[in-house]
Image (cartoon, rainbow, N blue to C red):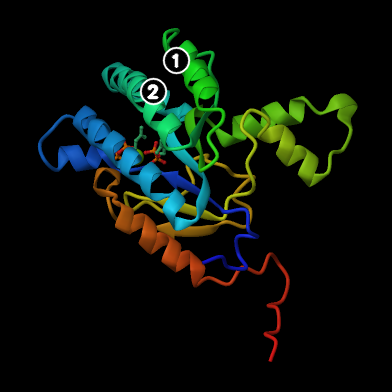
Amino acid sequence: MRTHTDNGRGLHVAIIMDGNGRWAEARGWPREAGHRAGADAVRRTVEAAPKLGVRTLTLYAFSSDNWKRPAREVSALMRLFRIYLGRETARCVENGVRLSVIGRRDRLPALLVPMIEQGERATAGGANLHLRLAVDYSSREAILHAAGRLRGGRAATREEFARLLNEAAPAPDVDLLIRSGGEQRLSDFLLWECAYAELHFTPRMWPDFAAGDLEAALADYHHRQRRFGAVPAVKAG
Ligand code: IPE
Ligand code: IPE
Ligand code: MG
């Protein structure tokens, strides 16, 4: 069912996939085991999203501040991205999922960058879902970078700036932001793009996140009244 809230273009859902480490620690396992289980939750979510009216899905996989973590955990995460890209690209093509990776690439392991480019090329025709994976991503840094590219101090319109900000993987503003893991903060994710996003926080740890959780978050979203600063429209009749 199409609602007034999606303008017929499908929804942009963004997810802060948090709680992998705690999920593993609660089982007496190393944090890396949580990240591995988290990758399965990504697959489930990507599969469920198009059926729920989601056309753009931006997943926070690794923040620029996550470099502060122990080297062992960081390299496990980088290895997982490699495995994910290697394994999931073909599945994305099959399911009409277009993959984009947002964030800095110059600090990623050299092996990863050509795999990202190959994955983006191979899936470029995907029309069912635009999957944007945020890796070495910082929203403040992305904003600074876009601002630095404004020519001659010229003031841009919001629309122009938003385009500049998301040039690598164009996407509309976020409609719904979900954060798993119980924390209620943005952690430098999509600060500009979430200006009017609806926020949904769930205590579910990311490795336990299932299609039903995405469905519940969207059901919650469809009950919200988005006003964008205006007064609610008067219902006809
Ligand atoms: C999110 O889970 C994944 C990344 C940040 C890479 P965490 O690793 O932050 O898990 P918690 O918050 O420590 O449980
Ligand atoms: C945000 O989670 C980053 C990702 C989920 C990739 P963090 O676990 O890094 O955020 P903080 O430190 O709790 O704010
Ligand atoms: Mg965390």
When asked about the image quadrant of residue 161, the answer is top right
Secondary element under disc 2, as helix, strand or loop, is helix
Image quarter for ligand 2 equals top left
Residue 182, above or below 77: below
When asked about the image quadrant of residue 155, the answer is top right
Residue 189: percent from left, percent from top: 52, 41
- Label 1 amino acid? Met
* Of the pair 65 and 232, the residue shown nearer to us: 232
Q: Please say if the residues under marks 2 and 1 sit with CB atoms less than 8 Å apart.
A: yes
The residue positioned 50% from the left and 42% from the top of the image is 129
* Of the pair 23 and 12, the residue shown nearer to us: 12
User: Please, which residue is most extreme toward the front here?
Assistant: 94
- Residue 105 appears left or right of 145: left
* Of the pair 150 and 211, the residue shown nearer to us: 211
Q: Which residue is mark 2?
A: 85
Disc number for residue 115: 1
Residue 156: percent from left, percent from top: 84, 39
Q: How many residues crowd around disc 1 within 10 Å: few (fewer than 14), some, or many (20 or more)?
A: some
- Label 2 amino acid? Leu
Residue 126: percent from left, percent from top: 53, 35
* Of the pair 44 and 176, the residue shown nearer to us: 44
Disc number for residue 103: none
Secondary element under disc 1, as helix, strand or loop, is helix
